[in-house]
């Protein structure tokens, strides 16, 4: 059965073994680079923010919104995380989210994790962040310019991640490029509008409440840690809306259905919380919510742990300063 919360999560079977292995190699190299880069860039406030953003992205990805033609989509989140933390930290956050989704919820293939994380965690983060900075330089540093730059960066991140997915499908002989490219780009151009709206709303909220958390902000960091609890509570609250997700197939699933390669998707080798449900909870809405709460907390813990792992030792910080 094809996972209902698929988005651009490529299942095993859509990518050939050689292509999937290339994805793993690329991701491994980029994670090593991300660990090195973030170790020098991290500040104390960014460590809990990594966990909170990972939790929010995970929870938000459970809520599919309707798109034209009986298709749905949902937040990717790579651009949002990159704007707040920088692109290298976004690579770590998004890889944590996608890894937990694949291992705990069987959302996305295990062999396909490499290119899933590359598409949604690397391409989305770096293109979204680059477009955001370019537009801000052109339009200025005002609040309106920042939100316009966020919208364009978020939309572009989805579109380029979709194009990359189409290329990977073509290289795997799953779907010809002449079919995969226009269809993936077309449907995700619409999904990208939803991505832009959600990302702008999230950034506008942060502008009003904690502008110092935005990467490159000149605002002085506010004292207190209450925002950490509030951020986590917001992420947990989002999961309660997950039963309202649009049931229609989303971008990649719709393309696979329409062009006859959906059957290539392979069943996962094991099930833990399949399709974002808890098997022993009979009520479907309650099952989805509980699974979402579990996943949100696990993702927050994993991403926070990664941030702690790469944090420069206190002695190094004092020496460098």
Image (tube, rainbow, N blue to C red):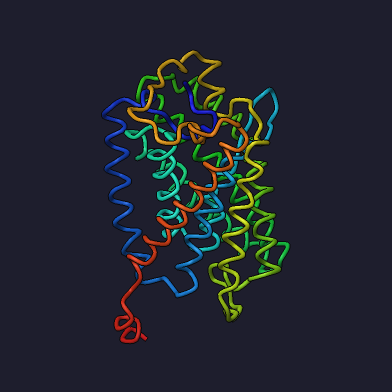
Write down the quadrant of residue 33 in the picture.
Answer: bottom left
Relative depth, front residue between 245 and 262: 245
Q: Quadrant of the C terminus?
A: bottom left
The answer to whether residue 187 is left or right of residue 160 is right
Relative depth, front residue between 176 and 74: 74
Task: Report the label total.
Answer: 0
Q: Residue 60: give x, y in percent of width and height.
A: 59, 46
Write down the quadrant of residue 314 in the picture.
Answer: bottom left
Residue visible at 60% across and 59% down?
233
Residue visible at 40% across and 35% down?
272
Residue visible at 35% across and 81% down?
317
Residue visible at 67% across and 67% down?
207
Q: Is residue 163 above or below residue 180?
A: below
Q: Residue 249: give x, y in percent of width and height.
A: 59, 25
Relative depth, front residue between 101 and 138: 101
Q: Residue 205: give x, y in percent of width and height.
A: 69, 62
The answer to whether residue 298 is left or right of residue 77 is left
């Amino acid at each position: 059965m094809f996972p209902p919360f698929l988005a651009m999560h490529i299942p095993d079977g859509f990518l050939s073994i050689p292509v999937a292995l290339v994805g793993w190699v690329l991701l491994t190299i980029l994670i090593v680079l991300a660990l090195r880069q973030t170790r020098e860039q991290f500040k104390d406030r960014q460590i809990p923010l990594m966990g909170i953003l990972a939790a929010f992205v995970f929870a938000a990805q459970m809520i599919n919104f309707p798109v034209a033609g009986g298709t749905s989509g949902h937040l990717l989140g790579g651009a949002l995380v990159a704007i707040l933390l920088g692109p290298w930290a976004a690579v770590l956050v998004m890889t944590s989210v996608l890894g937990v989704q694949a291992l705990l919820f069987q959302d996305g293939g295990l062999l396909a994790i490499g290119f899933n994380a590359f598409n949604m965690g690397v391409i989305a983060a770096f293109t979204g962040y680059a477009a955001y900075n370019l537009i801000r330089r052109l339009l200025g540093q005002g609040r309106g310019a920042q939100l316009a730059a966020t919208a364009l960066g978020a939309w572009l991140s989805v579109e380029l991640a979709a194009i990359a997915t189409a290329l990977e499908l073509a290289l795997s002989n799953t779907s010809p490029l002449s079919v995969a490219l226009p269809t993936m780009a077309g449907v995700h151009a619409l999904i990208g509008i939803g991505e832009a709206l959600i990302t702008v709303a999230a950034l506008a909220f942060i502008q009003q409440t904690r502008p110092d958390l935005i990467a490159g902000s000149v605002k002085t960091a506010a004292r207190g840690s209450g925002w950490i609890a509030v951020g986590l509570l917001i992420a947990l609250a989002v999961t309660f809306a997950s039963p309202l997700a649009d049931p229609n197939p989303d971008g990649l699933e719709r393309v696979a259905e329409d062009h006859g390669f959906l059957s290539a998707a392979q069943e996962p080798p094991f099930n833990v919380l399949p399709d974002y449900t808890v098997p022993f909870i009979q009520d479907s809405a309650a099952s989805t919510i509980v699974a979402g709460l579990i996943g949100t907390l696990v993702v927050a813990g994993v991403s926070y742990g990664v941030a702690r792992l790469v944090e420069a030792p206190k002695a190094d910080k004092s020496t460098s300063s």
